[in-house]
């Protein structure tokens, strides 16, 4: 049984000592622990201030470069805005800059993560990729955004520029995080989980920006991406998968919200953008059930699962079992949070915690027992 | 009857929306027809590998399937955004433009 982290908070003065006197690894650990425990105490803004001071003083913190592909396909293109530069006259550049910045902030301030790799990796984004490119992607090194249907006459345009919705930016950046952590293979159920993680944290960035609770949020992914020529509110609905659009030109949103409607297909890497509706809804139900800001507890459970538990081949059942396990470890077995996670998965037809989760005991992390972690950090434990 | 027939299909991408079109070169406006003909020649399309794919699937990237039928026979190429050679990306860009303008018709 793992210790409940709130019951073993490391005294802040001790963390500050480590931050000032420890090795680089120890300081990073202390910062992360501080940010995490501050968050548990609900002191989001205190954490924000503290974390920003720390990241300035200690590690390479938020560093962004926005490039312009000038409608070509060469990446990354020409740098047009670097960290600290003032806003430009180009909305796509500014949206990519601000959106990647806020995504960095969510991961840093709430989950104690320093960028995509946890080590301050620079966030590179390219806008204006190709002509008429109605897509955004993560290429393993950077985020790439097209301008939608800018090359077509207004009456034929379906898509606006892909930086228009901040959750798309959060979505792409989270693909990077997944690549450094669980490495969920991009096919079938593990691929749909990869997609779902990106939608979850993309949506959380939007909710964080708007300061919305789970009940207040719309849980729409890609709001504003469709032009008014399309009958739809966005690309996906985490709350009600399959209802985001219904239009004579592009058809109806194909996402299922329950295992009984799981779509078996070879297209789209086995339907990764389709079946992600199932874990998306599980997260939504769990977050709503827990209440308050979804990024706090539900987001933390999903983040720890992504960072420490899920593996490349994880399927929906494993994701259910592991998020259930993490919820018990973080907030107490049988507690409201763990029951909320169970309910979330049950609503999509998956019984969480019914079997033994298939992963071995992980190495201790800040989320797994503060005393163990701090002893390790101070060199009082061998491993 | 046109001498070249093309079938293009795009799947995947952030929105997960399929885009597909099928047309004969003669159906296109003259300028597009010439552009397409030139690109197929420059690419030596019938000599391209059947698959130009990355080692691991590209995250949120489109997968493009291009099938060309002519008196030489039929040849198809499957590729993604980031691994397609530059000239092939030009062809994809053009096919995308054609497919997107034909959305209401197909």
Image (cartoon, coloured by chain):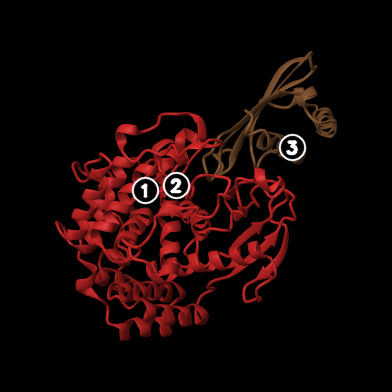
Given residues A111 and A145, the one toward you in this image is: A145
Circles 1 and 3, Cβ within 8 Å, touching? The answer is no
Residue A62 falls in image quadrant: bottom right
Instruction: Check disc 2: other Cα within 10 Å, few if <14, some if 14-19, many if 20+.
Output: many
In the image, residue A13 sits, relative to residue A132, either above or below, namely below
Is residue A68 rendered to the left or right of residue A27?
A: right
**Residue A236: image tag:** 2
Residue A147: give x, y in percent of width and height: 66, 52
Q: In this figure, what is the number of numbered marks?
A: 3
What is the secondary structure assignment of the residue under circle 2?
A: strand
Residue occupying the point 57% across, 58% down: A164
**Is A198 or A329 nearer to us in this picture?**
A198
Determine which residue is flagged by label 3. B94
Q: Quadrant of the N terminus of chain A?
A: bottom left
Element assignment for label 3: helix
Alpha carbons under labels 2 and 3: distance apart: 28 Å
Residue A280, disc: 1
**Dots 1, 2 in contact, CB < 8 A:** yes
């Amino acid at each position: 049984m793992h210790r409940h982290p709130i019951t073993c908070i490391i005294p802040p003065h001790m963390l500050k000592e480590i931050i000032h006197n420890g090795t680089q690894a120890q300081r990073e650990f202390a910062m992360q622990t501080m940010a995490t425990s501050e968050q548990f105490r609900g002191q989001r803004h205190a954490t924000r201030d503290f974390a920003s001071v720390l990241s300035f003083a200690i590690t390479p913190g938020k560093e962004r470069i926005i490039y312009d592909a000038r409608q070509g396909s060469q990446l990354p293109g020409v740098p047009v805005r670097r960290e600290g530069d003032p806003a430009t006259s180009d909305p796509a550049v500014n949206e990519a800059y601000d959106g990647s910045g806020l995504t960095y902030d969510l991961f840093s301030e709430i989950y104690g993560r320093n960028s995509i790799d946890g080590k301050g990796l620079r966030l590179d984004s390219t806008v204006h990729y190709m002509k008429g490119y109605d897509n955004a992607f993560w290429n393993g090194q950077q985020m790439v955004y097209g301008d939608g249907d800018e090359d077509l006459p207004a009456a034929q345009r379906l898509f606006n520029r892909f930086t228009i919705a901040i959750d798309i930016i959060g979505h792409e950046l989270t693909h990077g995080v997944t690549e450094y952590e669980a490495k969920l293979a991009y096919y079938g159920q593990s691929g749909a989980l990869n997609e779902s993680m990106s939608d979850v944290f993309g949506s959380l960035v939007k909710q964080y920006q708007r300061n919305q609770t789970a009940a207040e949020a719309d849980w729409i992914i890609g709001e504003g991406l469709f032009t008014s020529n399309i009958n739809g509110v966005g690309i996906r609905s985490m709350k009600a998968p399959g209802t985001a659009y219904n239009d004579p030109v592009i058809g109806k949103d194909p996402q299922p919200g329950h295992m009984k409607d799981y779509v078996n297909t070879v297209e789209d890497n086995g339907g990764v953008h389709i079946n992600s509706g199932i874990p998306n809804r599980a997260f939504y139900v769990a977050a709503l059930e827990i209440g308050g800001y979804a990024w706090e507890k539900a987001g933390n459970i999903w983040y720890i699962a992504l960072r420490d538990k899920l593996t490349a081949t994880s399927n929906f059942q494993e994701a259910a079992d592991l998020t259930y396990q993490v919820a018990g470890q973080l907030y107490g077995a049988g507690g409201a949070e763990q029951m909320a996670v169970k309910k979330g998965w049950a609503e999509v037809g998956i019984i969480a915690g019914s079997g033994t989760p298939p992963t071995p005991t992980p190495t201790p992390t800040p989320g797994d027992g503060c005393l163990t972690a701090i002893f390790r950090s101070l060199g009082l434990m061998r491993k | 009857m046109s001498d070249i027939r093309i079938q293009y299909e795009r799947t995947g991408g952030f929105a997960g929306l399929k885009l597909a079109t099928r047309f004969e070169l003669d159906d296109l406006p003259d300028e597009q027809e010439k552009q397409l003909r030139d690109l197929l020649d420059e690419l030596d399309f019938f000599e391209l590998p059947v698959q130009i794919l990355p080692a691991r699937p590209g995250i949120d990237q489109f997968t493009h399937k291009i099938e060309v039928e002519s008196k030489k026979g039929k040849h198809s190429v499957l590729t993604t955004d980031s691994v397609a050679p530059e000239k092939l990306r030009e062809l994809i860009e053009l096919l995308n433009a054609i497919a997107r303008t034909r959305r209401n018709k197909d």
